[in-house]
Amino acid sequence: MTNKFLALTAAVAALSCFANAASARDQIRIVGSSTVYPFTTAVAEQFGKSGSGKTPVVESTGTGGGFKLFCGGVGVDHPDFSNASRAIKKGEFELCEKNGVKDIVEIKVGIDGLTIAQSKAGAKASLTRMQVFQALAEMVPDKDGKLVANPYKNWSDIDAALPNVKIEVLGPPPTSGTRDSFHELFMEKGAEGFESLKELKKTDSKAFDKVWKSIRKDGAYVEAGENDNVIVQKLEANKDAYGIFGYSFLEENTAKLKGVAIEGVEPEYDAISSGKYKGARPLFIYAKKQHVGVIPGMDKFIAEYVSDKAMSKDGYLARKGLVALPADEAKKVAETATAMKTLAADAVK
Amino acid sequence: MTDISMDIARPEPKFRLDLTSDAARARIRSRYRAETRFKAYGIAALTVTALFLAVLMFDILRNGLPAFWQHSLLLDVPVAADIVDPAGKREAGAIKGADYFPLMRNALNAAIPGIESRSASKQLTRVLSVGAPDRLRDMLVADPSLIGKTIKVPLLLSDDADLYYKGAGTGIDDRAGRGTATPSGRTGEITVLTSSNDFAEELQNIKLRLKSVADTISRDAGRIERSGPDQAQRVASMRAEVANLANRYQQPGNAEALDSKVPSVLVAINGGLVKATRLDASGITGDVLLPLKSAEEAKPGTWKVVHYSTPESDRKVTDQEVAFLERLREAGAVDRHFNWRFFTTGDSREPELAGIRGALTGTALTLLVTLLLCLPIGVMAAVYLEEFAPKNRWTDVVEVNINNLAAVPSIVFGLLGLAVFLNFFGLPRSAPLVGGLVLALLVLPTIIIAARAALKAVPPSIKEAALGVGASHQQAVFHHVLPLAMPGIMTGTIIGMAHALGETAPLLMIGMVAFIVDVPTAFTDAATVLPVQIYLWSDLPEPAFQSKTAAAIVVLLAFLFLMNGAAIWLRKKFERRW
C-alpha cells in the first residue's frame, strides 16, 4: 500500500504546484454556441494576427453550456465572452447576477438564416411555415380545427402543389441551439397561422406551447446529430429528403444543394439581411465588462468584431457565411459595443 | 475399422458401433459438413470485416490525400521599398508589420494585365489566400537586402482556387469558330457577331431547356387542377407562364438570355475571353472577362466557342475566377507542392492555412503527462495487488472496482476532471496537464489489468528459486518477476495509450474542445488534441475542411498503427515462453 500511497501523494503535490499557474492570464477565453464558433474564431485569428495580443481561445460548448460557464463568476478562472445563437434567457441572466457577473454587454454580431435545403436533383419546392408545421408537428389541427395526431405521410397530402414524396426532414437534435431556433421561427409561427391554434394560444398558452414544441416521432423528422455536414451528405444521397441547417452550410454547398423558398422567399443573402426571409435569427456575443482592463485586449477584440472589415457586407465574416446586419443597425451595435453599454435586467426576456 | 466391432467380443452387444453403415457415413458426412460450414462462416466474417475496413480506408485516403498537396502561384513580385519599409531602416518589426496586400495585387495585375472593373479586380485578388504573403514576409525578414528587387515567390492560393485545381471546378470544352467573328470592343460589355450561325447549337439547348421547364409547370398545374377547384387562380397563372415559355421556345430564331443556372457559353477571341449573357444564332452579347488585345475581326478557326459545363450557380468559383485560374495555369504560374504547412502551423479558420502542429504538440504533451502518471502508479498497483496484498474481502473489492472502472464511459472521467482538477484544485482550463490527468484515470485500469496478467504469466518457479537462494520477497519480485513481465506490461501500456490517443469525450468537459491557434509550449498552455481537431474541423462549412478532416484522420491512424506496431514488436522481441 505504501507505494501507491506515496505515488498518490506525489501526484497531489504536483497538482498543487501547478495550481498557481492559473492565477495570471493574458489570453482571452471565449465559450459558447457552435453556430457562432466559425465566426468568432475568424475574428480571434484576425485579432491574433494583427498583433493586438495572444490569439483568444474559443471553445465550442453550445449556447446553454456557454452561459453556464460565463455566468460562473468573475475572475481569471471564468471566460470573458460567450457566443450565443439566441438572446440570453432570464434564468441565465439571474444566474450571472447571483454569481456577481453584473455588467454584461450584449453585442448582436449578425444574422444567421435558418434554411431548409434539398438536393439539387430533387423536385423544386416552395413551402410556407404553416406547411412546415403541418409536416413536422406531432399534433396538427384537422379541417374543423380539432387537434389530431399528424396524418400527413407525403408532402402532397398537405398541399397538392407540393411534390408527391414521403415527408422526410433531417434536422438537429434537441440539445442544439439551432433546434430551438427552428421551433421558434418555423413551428411557432406556423402554428400561429391556424385560427384554431390562435384561439388556443389565448385560452391556454401552455397547451399551445406544447403543440409547437412537439415534433412528430414517427420517422418523418430524423435527428441527424450536431454535425451539419452529416446532413449535407445525407441530402446528397437522398434527393427526396429535406435538411435544416444554417445558411453558411447552404452557401458553401451550392454545388450540391438548393434552398427551399419560405413564403415564396428564397434563402439568399440579401433576403436574409433585409429580413424578407422569415427563417432568420440574430447571433450574439456577450462580454463580461468586469474583465475589461483585467484581461488584456478585450476592448480591442470587441472593436475588431464590430469593425467594418469584419462585420460589414463585404467583411471577412460575410465570406464565412454570416449575414451582415443592415447598415444602420450595425452602426448602432458598434456604438453600444465600443461604449460598453451593459445589458439592463428589464431588457432580458 | 470393421475390426472394432469384432474386437469387442461380446455375445450379444446391445449397441453395435458400425461405422460402415449408411447411417453412420451420413452422420460423419454431416459432421464434416458442419465443420466446413463453420470455416466458411469464419472466412465470410473476416471478408466482411476486411471489406468494411477497405472501404473505410479507401474513403479516408481518397478524401484525405489531396489535402497533403497544395497549390501556389509562382509570380514575380516587385518588392517596392516604399510599401514594405517606408522608413527605410530595414528593421524586422517594420517589415513584419507592413501591409503586403498592394504587393500581391501588383504581382497579380502584372500576371493578368488589363483588368479594369472593380468587381473583377476584387475577384482576382481573392484567388490568393489571406496568408499568401507569409512566405514573402519570412524571406524579407531573413534577408532585408531583397527589398527593392523583384523576386519569384510562391503565393498561396485560397481554398476555393486550390480546390479548383484539384478538380472541383467545371468541365471545359471548346470548338473552333466556323465564321468570321467581329467583336464590338475590347473591354466592358461588348457584342461578338459571326458570319455563320455559330451559336445555333447553344440557342437550341436553351430552347430545349425552356421546353422542359414548361412541361414541368404544365404537369404540376394539371395535378393541382385535379386536386380541387379552390386553386383556380394559381392554375391560371401557371398556365400563363407555360404559354409565355412556349412562345419563347417555339420561335427558334429569337435571342435568349443566359443565367447562372445553365452551363456558361464563352467566346475566346483575340487573346481575350467574353462571357455570353444573351445569345442568338449568329452572335452574343456579353461581358469581357479577360480583355481582348484588339477589336479586329477574327478569321474562322482563330477564335473559339468555350463551354463551362457546370452552371455557375453549381460551383464555388465564378466564371470570372475560372477565367483567371485557367489563364494562370496556361501561363505556367501554378505550382503544386507538398503541404508542409499542414505539419508546421496551428489551427486556422482559413482551410489553406490550417495545420495540425498545435494539435500534435497538444497530443504529445497530454500523452506524456498520462504516461508519466499511469505507468508507475499502474505497475506499482499491479505488483502490490498481485504479489504482496493479502487475499481478503478488501482486495476483492478493489479488484472488482478496477475492472468496473475499465468499463466506465469516458465522458464520466471528464466530469470527474472538471469537478476535481478544475473546480477543486483550480488548474487552468484547456491545459494538457489536466487532459493528461483525466486520460491517466481513464487508462489506469487498463494498465493495472494488463500488468497483473503479465505478472501472473511469469512462472512461479522463478520466484521460488530466488526465494530459495535467500532473496527477500521484494527482491524476488523486483529483480526477477517484474523484468520478465515487462514486455507484457509495455504492450498493455501502449495499447492503453493508443486508447487515450483517440479520446475526445472526456476532454470536452475540461475545455480542450477549442479553437487554439498558438502551438502550446508548456503543460499549462491552452491546447487541443488530434481527435478533437478532427471533430472541430468536421463541423465547419468550408468543403476544404472536409478534406483537412480526412487528412488529420490519416495522421491519427498513422500514429495508432505506429503505436500498435510498437506493441507487437516489443512482444515479439522480448516475449519468453516457458
Image (cartoon, coloured by chain):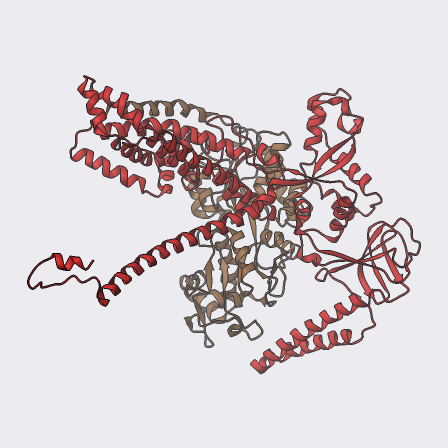
Residue B540, given in percent of the width and then of the height, sits at 56, 46
Relative to residue A142, is residue B458 drawn left or right?
Answer: left
Q: Which chain wears brown?
A: A
Tell me: residue B172, above or below residue B491: below
Can the viewer see residue B428? no
Is B450 situated above or below B187?
A: above
The relative height of residue A70 versus residue B175 in the rendered view (above or below) is above
Q: Position of residue A310 (x, y in %)?
A: 65, 41
Q: Residue at x 46, y 52 (%)?
A: B52
Indicate left or right for B316 with B120 as reference: left
Chain identifier, colour red: B
Identified at 57% across, 66% down, the residue is A127
Can you give x and y, in whole percent of width and height, for residue A62 in the image?
A: 47, 46
- Where residue B262 appears, as percent x and y from the top left, is 72, 62
| Quadrant in the picture for the C terminus of chain B | top left
The residue lying toward the viewer, choosing from B343 and A239, is B343
